[in-house]
């Protein structure tokens, strides 16, 4: 990198006015995010853009969860200026903001080398499944179980379930996604044991997050939403070890890509009350 090139790069806070330019960055990478998706992500977090001569050439978003965790996503440097240290500058600036926190992210193949250099380690894989949803078979529920719309009294129980399943305070995501999408709750007798949120995202709909006590419960929640969306484009991002991949492929939602889960710091410790079968979004974790 020459001194001249380095001097041109300016990092500044991302604002709502930058959402259009940011969405052009993701469009160039053939990522599906709409301006609405960027705006929602930014509204619950913080962002930086990199500019050269007043033109936005790079982006990064970050989110704080409780006092101990944070995640980073939407790290993009436009193709023409990749390899000049801009990605590293964006990451280092966001990591400075998150000092003292464990930071997580889901890395593309292109991102992994940079994140490794910054102290991130691999700990899992997320598989992206998507397609126009075909007619769905019903998943039989067990005795005493049912899937029903979320009610006003469910908020606290779902927050506790999500926190337990992820080991992280996820209230921010839960409140935002519930307000924006539709939530169904899995109950055993009268106890809430899982939930799944359907919301507009990217090319169609995302079922995200999906939290359930076991794989049967996760299938019941997914089948509920897929059944209502027959003929619409649906996406689900699952943990590789969730045992859902083969089933999703079988019912018509094949895997189309993978990202690597990486962490810098002490990883969260999930409880055993429930499992996160589908993540909220690749960017958010
Ligand atoms: C990933 C991305 C943001 C990196 O941005 P960038 O500005 O090109 O990266 P930098 O120039 O800052 O390089 C970062 C470091 O990674 C290293 N690196 C990059 N690719 C590498 C590879 N294949 N093997 C080894 N090291 C590699 C660079 O040498 C550099 O190391 P250094 O800082 O010690 O010299 C950019 O490639 C990009 O936008 N890719 C498409 C979108 C994407 O996948 N984003 C990641 C989402 S998780």
Image: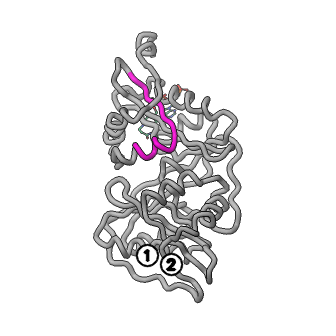
- Where is residue 282? Give x, y as percent: 48, 51
- Check disc 1: other Cα within 10 Å, few if <14, some if 14-19, many if 20+: some
Residue at 41% x, 70% y is 249
User: Looking at the image, is 60 positioned above or below residue 273?
Assistant: above
Q: Could one spot residue 106 in this view of the protein?
A: yes
Distance of label 2 from label 1 (alpha carbons): 8 Å
Residue at 54% x, 55% y is 125
Dot 2 corresponds to which residue? 147
Residue at 52% x, 65% y is 210
Quadrant position of residue 81: top left
Colour scheme in the image? one colour
Tell me whether the residue at label 2 lies in contact with that at label 1, contact meaning CB atoms closer than 8 angstroms: yes
What segment is highlighted magenta in the picture?
Answer: 39-51
Residue found farthest to the left: 231
Check residue 40 for magenta coloring: yes
Q: 133 left or right of 265?
A: left
């Amino acid at each position: 990198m020459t001194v001249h090139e380095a001097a041109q790069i300016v990092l500044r806070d991302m604002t709502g006015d930058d959402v259009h330019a940011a969405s052009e960055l993701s469009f160039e990478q053939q990522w599906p995010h709409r301006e609405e998706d960027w705006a929602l992500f930014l509204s619950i977090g913080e962002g930086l853009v990199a500019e050269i001569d007043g033109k936005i050439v790079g982006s990064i978003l970050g989110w704080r969860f409780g006092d101990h965790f944070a995640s980073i996503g939407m790290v993009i440097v436009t193709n023409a200026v990749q390899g000049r240290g801009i990605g590293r500058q964006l990451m280092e600036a966001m990591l400075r903001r998150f000092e003292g926190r464990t930071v997580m992210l889901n890395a593309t193949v292109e991102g992994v080398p940079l994140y490794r250099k910054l102290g991130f380690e691999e700990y899992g894989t997320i598989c992206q499944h998507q397609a126009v949803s075909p007619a769905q078979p019903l998943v039989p529920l067990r005795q005493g179980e049912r899937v029903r719309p979320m009610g006003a009294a469910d908020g606290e129980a779902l927050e506790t379930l999500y926190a337990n399943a992820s080991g992280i305070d996820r209230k921010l995501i839960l409140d935002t996604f519930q307000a924006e999408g539709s939530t169904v709750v899995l109950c055993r007798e009268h106890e809430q044991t899982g939930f799944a949120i359907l919301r507009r995202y990217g090319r169609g709909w995302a079922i995200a997050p999906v939290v359930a006590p076991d794989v049967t419960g996760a299938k019941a929640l997914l089948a509920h939403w897929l059944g209502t969306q027959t003929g619409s484009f649906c996406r689900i991002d699952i943990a590789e070890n969730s045992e859902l991949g083969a089933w999703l492929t079988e019912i018509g939602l094949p895997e189309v890509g993978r990202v690597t889960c990486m962490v810098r710091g002490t990883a969260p410790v999930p409880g055993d009350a429930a499992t996160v079968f589908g993540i909220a979004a690749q960017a958010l974790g």
